[in-house]
Image (cartoon, grey):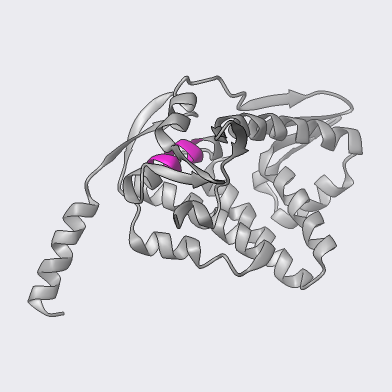
């Protein structure tokens, strides 16, 4: 490599090493993140044309950006939103288009900074006892990759793909199951076996797991619901979020 090029890249790296303060909802503590890079933005935008698989790739890349830029492998899925909002505001613009108007990202961060307690784990009791918890981003990415692999096998069968996404989403949040004396720790068995177990559970039990997940999603949606020109709009965290 040419010395001038190397020197130039080193200086760019120095800019990239500047830290941004971010908040971790899972612990109530603060940390630091490096800024979003142009390559990371391109990687996110490149998923736009891949349909359901693209949406999963987008989520996986987003998780990896949070993990890489913070250098913290213990972050959970609930930590993603405030960190991504901060990175986007710093790298692209502090405002974002929503419908026919614009919203200041800081107004959303202000709602999140109230540090509303999110229930991060629960025990579902019954004949089959299930413990559920908010997943680590590293674990979520393992499940997302398994979902992508399954969808590629499903091909163009949209209904089957939606069913697979639904099942794998439940898998992310299950920690352990107990039925009588039988006890299973989910991350100690192959992912395909976790899927088989979820598919075999009674509907009412799966509904209780889904309720736990939905309570978290509901909280995030409330944070992302903003008023634009007198109307309530929900800001979508998708490719367009990083491209306007």
> Residue 232 lies in what quarter of the image?
top right
The residue located at (55%, 40%) in the rendering is 77
Where is residue 114 shown, x and y percent of the image?
47, 19
Of 39 and 203, nearer the camera is: 39
The residue located at (76%, 73%) in the rendering is 155
Q: How many marks?
A: 0
Q: Left of 58 or right of it: where is 86? A: left
Residue 131 lies within the magenta run: no
* Quarter in which the N terminus is drawn: bottom left
Where is residue 104 shown, x and y percent of the image?
42, 36
Task: Give the answer, above or below, for where 238 lies relative to 29.
Answer: below
Range drawn in magenta: 79-86
Of 237 and 172, nearer the camera is: 237
Q: Left of 1 or right of it: where is 233? A: right
Q: Is residue 71 visible?
A: no
Where is residue 227 shown, x and y percent of the image?
56, 32
> Residue 6 lies in what quarter of the image?
bottom left
Where is residue 206 shown, x and y percent of the image?
83, 37
Magenta segment, prevailing SS (helix, strand or loop): helix
Residue 81 lies within the magenta run: yes
């Amino acid at each position: 490599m040419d010395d001038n090029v190397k020197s130039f890249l080193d200086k760019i790296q120095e800019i990239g090493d500047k830290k941004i303060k971010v908040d971790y909802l899972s612990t109530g503590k603060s940390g630091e993140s490096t800024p979003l890079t142009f390559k990371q933005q391109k990687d996110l935008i490149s998923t736009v044309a891949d349909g359901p698989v693209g949406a999963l790739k987008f989520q996986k890349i987003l998780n990896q950006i949070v993990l890489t830029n913070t250098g913290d492998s213990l972050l959970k899925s609930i930590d993603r939103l405030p960190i991504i909002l901060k990175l986007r505001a710093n790298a692209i613009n502090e405002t974002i288009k929503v419908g026919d108007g614009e919203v200041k990202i800081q107004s959303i961060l202000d709602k999140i900074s109230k540090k509303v307690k999110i229930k991060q784990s629960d025990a579902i009791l019954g004949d089959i006892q299930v413990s559920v918890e908010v997943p680590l981003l590293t674990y979520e990415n393992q499940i997302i990759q398994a979902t992508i692999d399954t969808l590629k096998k499903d091909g163009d069968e949209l209904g089957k793909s939606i069913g697979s996404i639904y099942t794998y989403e439940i898998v992310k949040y299950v920690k352990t199951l107990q039925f009588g004396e039988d006890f299973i720790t989910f991350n100690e068995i192959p992912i395909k076996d976790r899927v088989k177990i979820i598919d075999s559970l009674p509907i009412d039990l799966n509904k209780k797991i889904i309720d736990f997940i939905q309570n978290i999603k509901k909280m995030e949606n409330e944070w992302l619901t903003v008023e634009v020109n007198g109307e309530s709009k929900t800001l979508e965290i998708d490719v367009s979020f990083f491209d306007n």
